[in-house]
Image: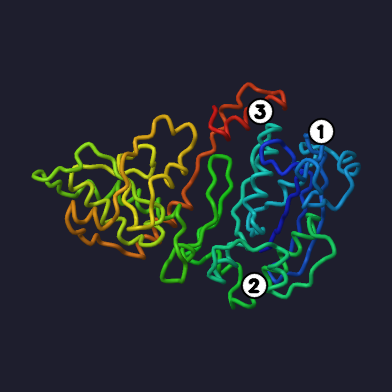
Amino acid sequence: MNILSFDIESCSGDHNDASMCSFGYCMSDENYNILKQEDILINPYPKGFYLGRFGRTPSVKLAYPESMFRSSPSFPAVYDKIANLFKPKTLVIGFAIENDIKYLNNACDVYSLPRIEFEYLDIQLLIKVYKKTRTDVSLENAIRDFSVNPTAKLHKSDEDARMTLMLAKNFCKQANLNLFEFANNDEIRMGVNLIEYSRLFACRKYFDLNYGFQYTKKMKLILLGEFTRNYIPNLTIKSDNLKLKNKIVGISSKLMLKNFNICRDIIASVFEHGGNYSSRFSKCDMIVGIDGEDSIEAYELELMPSELPHTKITKLIELSNYISEYGDLTNQPMSTDKDAQILFEYYSQKVQNNLTFLNGTTNLASRIQKIRNYSKGLL
């Protein structure tokens, strides 16, 4: 079995405008002996190369002058060559590869070509799991940390692909596992890119508190949402004490970050007293906050401008006062293993690829505009 590492450069940094200007790859056997390396240059659709803010020096410098890209073929002319690299029984890897997949899929969508199908591993995420960190690490820092001899030119697609391959080799040596063992690990779910659907690469350990990670705010909101959907319906409402009937209650960000374990207890209490919970502050009648640390003004600042005219928030109640008014909180069942599995399933769920909104549109500029509108939720 061979290993295919690939990297893509864009002339604009936009995933929606057919801006892919190079597809670099490095192919090796399972022992990391390099079989072929190539940088396929592409003439991108956008008229200009916009790699930095107006009037500023670009933070990313491409390996070739613009004239070389402009003299190269457009994506349809090299599509078959690229697609033929993704053969069955080839393990595909990349570094922050999901960004590259977005560029690749977008080029296929704009030019009415089938998306290329493959499974993949993301070396960046494996490193984050290995180091027990949620902080993204750059390719430049990763190759230094794992003693890979750097090349002169980063952002040269084929060299970045080769660096990723050598990084994978050294990472596996240090972790004492090979990529194929990672791929077959029960706690690894391979990323999938198919015509019908896609699924992000995920590792269960990345969501496990027992493994040393902490939850982000988004992860906590996911868990609270799951708790509300699946556990709350089985609660018994205290018909003799409906102090929160028709009230919507939120939980302050500070409380969620500081004492997440109590948040499920608060939600259960709210429902027991006839109320409802929402993470959207604009819908809330009150917010439960930390004693002496929260203010209603702070949460009004979190609202979108469009939400302000419709804001319902009338009260911020401190946690101790909430308990005094609505009674002691009951400890809700909690399992870190179950939470990890919920997050693992959420982040690695299949997403259907619905491109029917492009049907009947052949003009490239019109297809790009429709893709942009779709990504913004305007279609």
From where the camera sits, is residue 80 visible? no
Residue behind mark 3: 369
User: Quick one: which residue is furthest to the top in this view?
Assistant: 360
Identify the residue shown where x is 66% and y is 35%. Answer: 109
- Vertical placement of residue 233 versus 113, above or below: below
Residue behind mark 2: 171
Residue behind mark 1: 47
Q: Give the Cα distance between marks 3 and 1.
A: 15 Å
Quarter of the picture containing the C terminus is: top right
User: Quick one: which residue is furthest to the front in this view?
Assistant: 292
Identify the residue shown where x is 64% and y is 45%. Answer: 102
User: Which of 4/222 is in front?
Assistant: 222
- In the image, which is nearer the foreground, mark 3 or mark 2? 3
Q: Secondary structure at mark 3?
A: helix
Mark positioned earlier in the residue sequence (1 or 2):
1
Mark positioned earlier in the residue sequence (3 or 1):
1
